[in-house]
Amino acid sequence: MNRKAVSDLLLRVVWGAIVLWAFFGGVLAVGQAAPLANPCPRFQPGSEVTQGPDLFSHDGVLNVDLNYYTTVDTTIPLDSAPMPVPPPLATGLQQFCFTTPDGKEQPTLHVWPGDHLVIHVRNNASSSLAFEADQTIDYNQAPGENNTAMVGIAPDSPCLAANLTPASTNIYFHGLNIANKCGQNDVLRTIINSGQRFTYDVEIPDNTPPGLYWYHPHVHGTTDGTNQGGASGALIVEGIQNIQPAVAGLREQTLVFRDQPVPGGPFPLIGSEVPSWDLTVNYVTISSCQFPQPCDPTQFIGDFKPALMQMKPGEKQFWRVLDATNHIPLHLQLLYDGVPQPLQIVALDGVPVNSDDGTEEGRIVTRTDILLEPSARAEFIVKGPSESVKNAVFQTLRVSTGPGGDNHPQRPLFTIQASDDAPEPPLTIPRVSEVPDPQTFGDLADAKPTKTRKLIFSEVLQDPNNPLGPTNFFLTPEGATPTLFTIDNPPTIVTRQGSVEDWTIENHAMEDHAFHLHNLHFLLLAIDGVPVPREQQQYMDVVDSVFWDGVSAYPTVTVRLDFRGADVGDLIYECNYLFHADFGMRGIIRVLPKDEN
């Protein structure tokens, strides 16, 4: 493994232990009886993939109580990590979760366009810290040159907590184009500290595309640890059958892939069969070791233990797949006896494909593989294997993220067992019921941009004389000085409501990054300066920025952003490899109201 990758992995493990795991001294219930011994349970390798709990809106409202917990799973030891580590790391994997009062972990939330999603959050994470956070922020400043006080939020807003601690949490609704204000989709200033309660009242706009979204904590500095610890869940905006009738009546499966450290923390060589991170699917660990023993990189030969799925022979199903990992691009493929099967793609990143404004029926795109960046989603129709198929497997292919990136070998995710007795998934897509409202950003392809910008991904060693030292990560507007992001940074970009902007994202680093802007989708226009054909353009909320090879021109992607909606205030743009973002690869764009001078 290259020196930079080794140093980054060392930093991840040690920093994760110091900044996250040593901070959370256990589980402390606040204002209620003590929880179960493990409030965030997981499944053993080889377990059957089951659907998580589902919660549905009624009469236009989904009302949910969620408790936030953290615990340590001691069944996955990390005590053979080849470095000195603090005791909390040695005990096992740190886990995080949101649960309902009756113990439903990370429920899938189902809403319709126009609904209200009301979530009452109680932070039950322990406030017993190994040492105090060194970041205390005064939120009660007016917006100005030297601070990022949220535009449009009054100083007495309940979002403005007095301080930010390692036990703080909040919820980010990834992909939803909803209001960036207190109680909806603000993450910069919404801080829920240990022992506190907070209520979200999220209004789902009528023009929200039906499809798969997701939610997770997004507190700067701890996003990587809490998300990798499992505190993420799916959010489905219903009605996709009204744009793509082919899914009506199909059984549906929601598959959430998450990542976690490999037991023993091996340092894999790029191109080897040892992964940098393990995967889970619906909390079933896809083991890369003889679980639960730590990995031995000298002995490992890629003997993965996948999960199991049961299907009726030849049954068509609608799969909603979420890459909720922090570090792993998933290159998905379904094989029956070694033959790739068609994946009929209905939606990407929550947006039905080939339906620009939602008023026309979408057109299915058929492929035999799909590449998802961390945070991306794909929804597609599959047909189950016949009883004559001897080996049915859903896998991710090998993905190269560059000489400075992690190692992502080909590995099975789950095998499929065809049987007439297979249990049916609990949910069925309803029949076509209505004509959907026109979707937001439907005419973006024909809009004239009012501004063009270039942003640059870059990395440097903190100490150029120490190749094994930590790395600084930057996402910088062209011409500006690269600056590590902190929550009290001023905005690096200012725009105005009503504008349409084309951004070119250029990668100067020798590893992949993934561009994401909060609260907005964008339209993919060009790759390396080559326009994407109109029929292949897609609305997305995360896009791959491939690594620079050190010789050729810097890789680029160009996207179009739509600021003509109701969203104003301070939005985050970032790399969705969340470790990179937590260590500096974020920025703020301030969207001023169009009538403000």
Image (cartoon, rainbow, N blue to C red):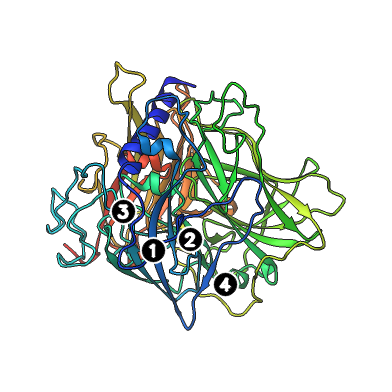
Cα separation between marks 2 and 4: 22 Å
Residue at the disc numbered 2: 106
Say which label, 2 or 1, has the lower sequence index.
1
Judging depth in this view, the residue of 576 and 256 nearest the camera is: 256
Q: Which mark is residue 67?
A: 1
Q: Which mark is residue 239?
A: 4
Q: Which mark is residue 357?
A: none
Judging depth in this view, the residue of 76 and 196 nearest the camera is: 76
Cα separation between marks 2 and 3: 19 Å
Cα separation between marks 2 and 1: 10 Å
Say which label, 2 or 4, has the lower sequence index.
2
Residue at the disc numbered 3: 126
Secondary structure under tag 2 reads loop
Disc 2 and disc 3 in contact, CB within 8 angstroms: no
Q: Label 2: few (<14), some or many (≥20) within 10 Å?
A: many
Q: Amino acid at mark 3?
A: Ser
